[in-house]
Amino acid sequence: MASYHVRSNSLPLRSHPAIPEFDEQLCRLRASEATSSSASTSVSCKLSGLQDLLDCVDRLLLLPLNQKALSQEEEKNGVDQILDGSLRLLDVCNTTKEALLQTKESTQELQSVLRRRRGSVTELSSEVKKFLTSRKVVKKAIQKSIGDLKCIEVSAINKDNENVAIVNMLKEVQAITHAIFKSLLSFISGPKSGSKSFISNIMRSNRIEEESQLNEFAKVDAALKKSGKKYVENAQNQLKELESCIEDLEEGLESLSRRMIKTRVSLLNILSH
């Protein structure tokens, strides 16, 4: 499990503007991660903040002193672990993007069906079941990714050796990235669904659920298990919100993925020289 550490303030190149910017971004991300929020805007802000953090790291990797520190033989194990972790995190990122794409496609298909719907409740329920089945597949893939995250070892920070500050910073980036991806995956997965089937739920009235704390994914899951005159209208509204949420997350993840790759390539280039 990822754990956070406080770095020593006596870092080399303390005057470099990217250092205080890095510290500020990291503190902001830690604070946001420590605050429980189901809002999609909060998740998007974390992804954006992580991109800014990686931008700081990329600038620091250009400095000769940091490149020399990363090339030290005694830091080989730590750097190799960082590279291994970055590759695993990229795999998780790709899985997350695939999960979002699959959910978006299912969302768009169901929206189309609801707009032109004809026939009985039973026929409509069959189409909704396809969406819920797709969600189960996505949730299964997400649970596997969460398991993969647990296998990523986040190494401890060496606070006593200020000469390898850049190594410590890379470890801190990996730790917060690990935590944010775990939150993102849980956000997409939503709460575990109950044992009652959709058909049994849609054919009779359900009790009113408290949904104010649910995110867009969970709201759709809940809306599609309800019945009543406003069922279709409510489901359509929730699906529109979900599609918009997914598009925002896709944009953030695509940009984050590019920055993660850039940082990894920069690190590999340093080690190859």
Image: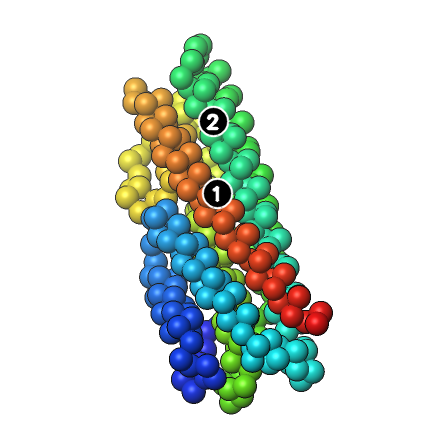
Residue 87 rendering spot, x and y as whole percentages: 64, 59
**Residue 109 against residue 52 in the figure, above or below:** above
Q: Which residue is mark 1?
A: 250
In the shown orientation, is residue 196 left or right of residue 208? right
Amino acid on which the number 2 mark rests in the picture: Gln
- The answer for how far apart the CA atoms under marks 2 and 1 are is 15 Å
Toward the viewer: 263 or 148? 263
Residue 257 rendering spot, x and y as whole percentages: 54, 52
Where, by quadrant of the figure, is residue 227 drawn?
top left
Toward the viewer: 79 or 183? 79
**Residue 147 appears in the figure:** no
Label for residue 6? none
**Residue 220 against residue 114 in the figure, above or below:** below
Residue at x-position 40% and y-position 17%: 115
**Residue 44 appears in the figure:** yes
Residue at x-position 49% and y-position 67%: 59
Other-residue count near label 1 (Cα within 10 Å), few / some / many at <14 / 14–19 / ≥20: some
Toward the viewer: 257 or 117? 257
Secondary structure category for the residue under label 1: helix
Dot placed on the residue nearer the N-terminal end, 2 or 1: 2
Nearest to the eye among marks 2 and 1: give it: 1
Where, by quadrant of the figure, is residue 158 drawn?
bottom right
Residue at x-position 43% and y-position 87%: 10
Residue 225 rendering spot, x and y as whole percentages: 41, 31
Q: Which residue is mark 2?
A: 108
